[in-house]
Image (tube, rainbow, N blue to C red):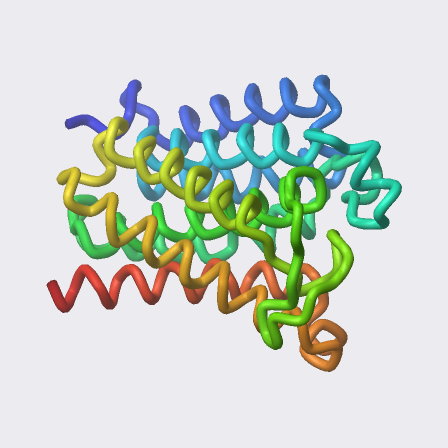
Amino acid sequence: MNAFLTPWPLAEAVGVTLSFGIAARALGAVSGSGLVGGIVVGSAIYRFSGWPGFVVLGVFFVLSSALTRFGYSRKHELGAAQAKKGRRGARHAAANCAAGVLLAAGYNLNGGGDPLWAAGLVASFATAAADTAGSETGPVLGRTAVLAASLKRVAPGTPGAVSVEGTLAGVAAASVVALAGYVSGLLDSAALIAPVVAAATAAAAVESVLGGFPAVRRTLGHDGMNLLNTVMGALLCMAMVWIT
């Protein structure tokens, strides 16, 4: 499968990413800095992994943007809503996509067909999607929220809180991204979907546990937690694929 649609991979990567970014900006999904940051990371991922990698990134972005707007007024009342009405900035792009850029580079350096690196790349975005789905739907749909670290019942939207509904939404979101990886051809086998989803779900759960500790949140910050989350999901998935 040809990973590029034209004979000019870099120009194609920048052109497609720029068009996607302008559309996202027009829809209010990203800020000005988010547009610039998105073009940089999106172009890099496209150049390293071709259009299949960009499809995975695009599915994650569209899904996370929709989830952020879901029940926004309710989340705003609870103090759990994203600032700026959910518009993503450059820091969001870096936190959620830095791991993906490195994994796409590794995928490219290994010949552009290594299933290990492909699974890690897809898992990084599946993990980000699972985390976003849990935090964005939990406060709206969750009936009972508990701290993942202690199982103490808390108010919806509390940092580190999880709910059954939010967890299931996270599994569904990770599955959508993993399926996008398979349909696009980045994952060369349907058998890779399971470890991607499992690793994403596990990493999101670990991130929720860590998020229940104020010292960890203060040290890493929201963006640092997201970066750690995507790295954990990718590495766990790659370990699972390598072992099996």
What residue is shown at x 55% (from left), y 44% (from top)? 165
Q: Is residue 104 visible?
A: no
What residue is shown at x 16% (from left), y 65% (from top)? 242
Seen from the viewer's position, the closer of residues 176 and 98 is 176
Position above or below: 19 against 107: above
Seen from the viewer's position, the closer of residues 104 and 168 is 168
Relative side of 14 to 178, left or right = right
Seen from the viewer's position, the closer of residues 35 and 158 is 158
Query: How many numbered tags mark residues here?
Result: 0
Position above or below: 191 against 17: below
Relative side of 207 to 171, left or right = right
What residue is shown at x 49% (from left), y 29% (from top)? 14
Q: Is residue 10 visible?
A: yes
Seen from the viewer's position, the closer of residues 153 and 18 is 153
The C terminus lies in quadrant: bottom left
Which residue is situated farthest in the bottom direction here? 215
Relative side of 63 to 156, left or right = left
What residue is shown at x 41% (from left), y 62% (from top)? 202
**Which percent across, then down, holds residue 188?**
15, 39
Position above or below: 65 against 107: above
**Which percent across, then down, holds residue 231?**
45, 64
Where on the picture, by quarter, is residue 4?
A: top left
**Which percent across, then down, holds residue 133?**
56, 43
Position above or below: 146 against 193: below
Where on the picture, by quarter, is residue 152?
A: bottom right
**Which percent across, then down, holds residue 1?**
15, 27
